[in-house]
Amino acid sequence: MKQYLQSGKVSLTIMLMCSLVFIINILLPINLNQFGIVPRSLSHLSGIVFSPFLHGSWLHLFSNFLPFVILGGLIGLKNTKRFWWLFIIHIISTGSLVWLFARGNSVHIGMSGVIYAFWGYLIIYGLVRRQLLHIFISIITLVFYGGLVFGVMPSTPGISFESHLLGAIVGALSGYYFAKSEKRVR
């Protein structure tokens, strides 16, 4: 049972680190959010890695907190190695796509691109893998987080729908890839 909770603990730790970064950002005279993704700006390439850990407000942080912990926990249900692989892949690929294709003259920050990648991964992985546990996780993800689908459309000013959309696409592609490659191994 302990192994099943490990990735949930890791996800919780990551979000607690995001909370600490947010508090430091409030206390420091420098705005750390400037280190987010600024599309097509070579001087902001580091934002691809840093942006998920930066948040614009307490509401922004809290709205990312629980979904990341839950979806991250589900991703690494059997072991944390899968969680870490996907966490890194999703940060780099989603961030790179946001850097390439998102609206310019804006700074994209927050964990939501990774959350959408986890969401897309869990749904597609279960459907393609076709094992009872993974199908169940896909259904649970759809039931509890199906409303995320509305976040991939440009609806609210100041919210990076590009991170949501590109994260969901990256997650779906990685879910398909991992499920197919595991089916071939068997």
Image (cartoon, helix red, strand yellow):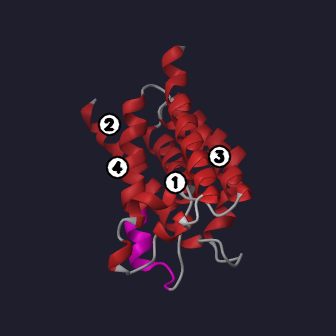
Image height check: is 21 above or below 6? Answer: below
Identify the main secondary structure in magenta.
helix
Residue type, label 3? Phe
Q: Which residue is mark 1?
A: 53
Residue at far bottom of view:
105
Q: Is residue 96 magenta?
A: yes
Image height check: is 72 above or below 44? Answer: above
Q: Which residue is mark 3?
A: 65
Residue sitting at 48 percent across and 18 percent down? 3
Q: Earlier in the sequence, mark 3 or mark 2?
A: 3
Q: Earlier in the sequence, mark 1 or mark 2?
A: 1
Q: Earlier in the sequence, mark 1 or mark 4?
A: 1
The spot of residue 96 in percent (x, y) is 37, 67
Q: CA distance from mark 1 to mark 2?
A: 31 Å
Residue type, label 2? Glu
Q: Which residue is mark 2?
A: 182
Mark seen at residue 177:
4
Q: Earlier in the sequence, mark 3 or mark 1?
A: 1
Q: Which residues are magenta?
A: 95-104
Residue type, label 1? Phe
Q: CA distance from mark 1 to mark 4?
A: 26 Å
Front-most of residues 107 and 157? 107
